[in-house]
């Protein structure tokens, strides 16, 4: 399928049309053949018209990118840090978020949609096929054409802004900015019986709103908008002002305060600079509100992925209900968006559509992309003829997200041991983008394509955590050697199934515990006097937002299951014995405070009497090393600091920065070829993590019963 993408740094132009596999459809998703998608003249145009320098600054301002750069500077090389930044800036990024088409497949948990329905959807880019969640998909009513239905998301954004403003019939509303969102906002307000004043600089947009029923309009280039609104409202001011513009001019936000009556309301729907004057706030005693996206559920991972819904009687208007309401207004003849469409472009002319909107040539600022009807589900796209790979391990990479893209794929491109045959990601586009980092014969969206490929010897699994065990077990049963990123499993049953599959098939199996293969770890091991040994491993991280995917109970499982096995494995490596017991303590994790999911201590005792302690916390200061390993043995102390410095009894012995990612792949190649023995402790770190997690769950349950 074709998909419209943008790269942060792209010398060939702002827009590219790329071919990607059909997205896979999960239990909570719908697969749709897109008929039309709407170009948002605000959000999207703001992205594609930015210079590469502006977009680079924006990307590097992202908290994850800052964290990644810091981590690499601490534990890696400058060249690796540069490679990560380059990958992020050049990867394909989908643009677009509003479309309509026909449902091709429906996940088993999705209600109210069936195959063949005409559907409108949100949060999906401009593409011939899309896989929105059930909460982002609504059926298009009879009487609403698919061109109009493609407005569903921007319509819901406008509707949510109206809801946040809480206007009543007969009140005055000033809509500041009559671009696409402003036009829709004015129309919805008029349908609700509100008296609307449009404020705009462009006479063409004013005329467009007037044709839709707007009786009061102010051309802000001809008269002072504050005085004009005061005049129209008899000196009282608007009951509420909705800011629907996108501008860096702070005058607009301050004018909105001044044109609103005392104890009125100002709602920010658009993106404007907020260098606000105090006195208009103070004198008018204004209420200030922000409207976020298109309703409750925005930025809630569980809701947006369709796994949960909010009860109707507690949350009357969710994202999905707002989407459906926009279509109902269209079906009832109260919201006519057809006049907003100036032109419909075939998807192959997407660049022209964006250019014409950006130039101001299309005054209505609304354009649609049209797609051929693509009903064929194609989960595999060949990139080239298969290469000769004599002596190389033919590899399939399943999961091409941030970690694989920035660590494993560049290393695979350096190594002669592997020939990457397949790249696979559920959405398809990430895999297509990853093919720019390491060459592959094909890209896929369904991992079963990779496992069914007889030309593949081994797989690397780097998906989100909840799929690790399922894919690893299936891969082993398919006769593929397995490199599995952490965690190995999310629960005891999953781990046992993976262990059984590896044992029964005899495939080479290696977990992605990179630290034991690092130069600092190997150097420390050579200077270590073993048995008995005590290890104190401290990991300091920043506090995580509640929405962080690693804290999601389904996909992430928390940091104890999702990351700590890295550290348990390194302790296992240094101690060289089987763990005998593990006990954990953590802060309580509640809905109000989830810090217990990343503030915990685990103590492990080993069969040779050694003890390992992991302290994982967000409470340390910004200058604290992220990782500090202290190994006490034989009246000696070996210390590793951020995997860039090793000290023996206080004297620096090594300053080689390395996290072991390249060396672990070299070891996996030897393991597959039978040049090294299988790891006897491959599953031990996962066992510790699960035992600790089970202990915490039992303690939490006991405390709940006591309360």
Image (cartoon, rainbow, N blue to C red):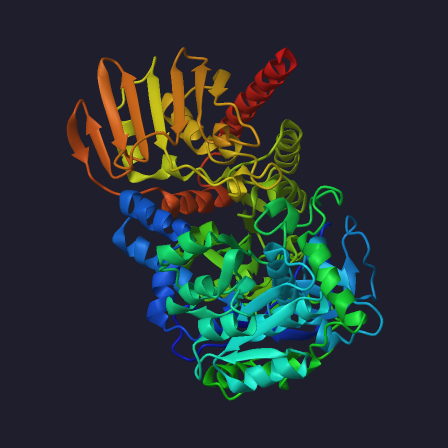
Left or right of residue 568: residue 110: right
Q: Is residue 514 visible?
A: yes
Instruction: Pinpoint residue 219: horizontal percent, then vertical percent.
Output: 49, 81
**Residue 64 versus residue 315: which sits nearer the camera?**
315
**Residue 185 versus residue 448: which sits nearer the camera?**
185
Instruction: Pinpoint residue 675: horizontal percent, then vertical percent.
Output: 44, 41
Q: Is residue 339 above or below residue 538?
A: below
Extreme-bottom residue of the structure: 361
Residue 375 occupies which quadrant of the picture? bottom right
Report the residue at 45% width, 77% height from top.
Answer: 14
Extreme-front residue of the structure: 234
Q: Is residue 348 above or below residue 663?
A: below
Instruction: Pinpoint residue 645: horizontal percent, then vertical percent.
Output: 22, 36
**Residue 88 versus residue 242: which sits nearer the camera?**
242
Q: Is residue 455 visible?
A: no
**Residue 472 versus residue 403: which sits nearer the camera?**
403
Report the residue at 30% width, 43% height from top.
Answer: 75
Q: Quadrant of the C terminus?
A: top right
Q: Is residue 382 above or below residue 207?
A: above
Q: Quadrant of the N terminus?
A: bottom right
Left or right of residue 442: residue 664: left
Instruction: Pinpoint residue 406: horizontal percent, then vertical percent.
Output: 41, 54
Q: How many marks?
A: 0
Residue 476 occupies which quadrant of the picture? top right
Report the residue at 53% width, 59% height from top.
Answer: 267
């Amino acid at each position: 399928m074709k998909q419209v993408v943008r790269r942060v740094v792209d010398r060939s132009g702002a827009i590219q049309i790329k071919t990607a596999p059909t997205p896979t459809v999960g239990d909570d998703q719908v697969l749709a053949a897109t008929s039309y998608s709407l170009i948002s003249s605000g959000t999207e145009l703001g992205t594609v018209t930015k210079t590469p320098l502006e977009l680079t600054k924006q990307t590097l301002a992202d908290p994850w990118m800052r964290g990644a750069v810091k981590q690499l500077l601490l534990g890696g090389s400058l060249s690796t840090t540069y490679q990560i930044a380059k990958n992020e800036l050049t990867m394909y990024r989908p643009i677009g978020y509003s479309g309509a088409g026909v449902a091709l497949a429906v996940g088993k948990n999705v209600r109210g949609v069936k195959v063949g329905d005409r559907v409108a959807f949100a949060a999906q880019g401009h593409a011939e096929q899309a896989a929105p969640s059930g909460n982002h998909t609504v059926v298009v009513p009879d009487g609403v054409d698919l061109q109009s239905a493609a407005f569903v998301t921007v319509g819901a954004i406008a509707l949510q802004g109206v809801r946040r403003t809480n206007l009543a019939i007969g009140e005055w509303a000033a809509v500041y900015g009559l671009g696409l969102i402003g036009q829709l906002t004015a129309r919805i307000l008029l349908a609700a019986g509100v008296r609307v004043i449009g404020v705009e600089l462009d006479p063409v947009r004013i005329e467009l709103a007037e044709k839709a029923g707007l009786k009061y309009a102010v051309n802000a280039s001809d008269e002072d908008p504050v005085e004009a609104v005061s005049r129209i409202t008899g000196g009282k001011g608007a009951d509420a002002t909705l800011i629907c513009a996108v501008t860096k001019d702070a005058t607009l936000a301050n004018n909105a305060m001044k044109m609103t009556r005392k104890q009125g309301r100002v709602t920010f729907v658009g993106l404007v600079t907020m260098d606000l004057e105090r006195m208009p706030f103070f004198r008018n005693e204004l209420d200030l509100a922000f409207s976020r996206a298109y309703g409750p559920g925005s930025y809630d991972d569980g809701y947006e992925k369709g796994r949960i819904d909010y009860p109707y009687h507690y949350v009357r208007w969710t994202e999905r209900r707002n989407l459906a309401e926009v279509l109902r207004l269209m079906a009832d003849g109260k919201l006519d968006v057809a006049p907003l469409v100036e032109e419909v472009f075939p998807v192959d002319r997407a660049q022209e559509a964006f250019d014409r909107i950006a130039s101001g040539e299309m005054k209505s600022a609304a354009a649609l992309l049209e797609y051929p009807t693509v009903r064929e589900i194609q989960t595999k796209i060949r990139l080239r003829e298969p290469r000769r790979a004599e002596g190389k391990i033919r590899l399939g990479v399943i999961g091409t997200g941030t970690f694989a893209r920035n660590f494993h794929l560049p290393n695979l491109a350096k190594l002669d041991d592997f020939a990457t045959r397949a790249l696979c990601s559920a959405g398809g586009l990430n895999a297509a983008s990853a093919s720019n980092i390491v060459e592959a014969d094909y890209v896929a969206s369904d991992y079963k394509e990779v496992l069914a490929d007889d030309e593949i010897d081994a797989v690397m699994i780097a998906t989100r955590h909840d799929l690790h065990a399922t894919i690893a077990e299936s891969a082993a049963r398919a006769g593929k050697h397995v490199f599995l990123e952490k965690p190995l499993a999310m629960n005891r049953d999953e781990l046992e199934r993976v262990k059984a599959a590896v044992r029964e098939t005899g495939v080479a199996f290696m977990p992605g515990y990179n630290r034991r293969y690092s130069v600092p770890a190997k150097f420390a091991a050579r200077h270590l006097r073993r048995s008995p040994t005590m290890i104190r491993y401290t990991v300091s991280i920043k506090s995580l937002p509640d929405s962080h995917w690693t804290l999601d109970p389904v996909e992430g499982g928390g940091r104890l299951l999702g990351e700590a096995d890295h550290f348990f494995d390194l302790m296992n490596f240094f101690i060289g014995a089987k763990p005998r017991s593990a006990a954990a303590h953590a802060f309580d994790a509640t809905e109000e405070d989830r810090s217990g999911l990343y503030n915990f201590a685990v103590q492990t005792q080993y069969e040779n009497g050694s003890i390992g302690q992991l302290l994982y916390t967000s409470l340390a200061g910004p200058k604290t090393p992220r990782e500090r390993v202290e190994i006490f043995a034989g009246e000696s102390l070996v210390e590793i600091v951020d995997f860039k410095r090793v000290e023996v009894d206080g004297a620096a012995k090594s300053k080689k920065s390395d996290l072991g990612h390249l060396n672990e792949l070299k070891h996996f190649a030897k393991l597959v070829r039978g040049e090294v023995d299988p790891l006897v402790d491959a599953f031990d770190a996962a066992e510790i993590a699960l035992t600790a997690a089970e202990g915490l769950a039992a303690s939490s349950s006991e405390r709940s019963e006591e309360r």
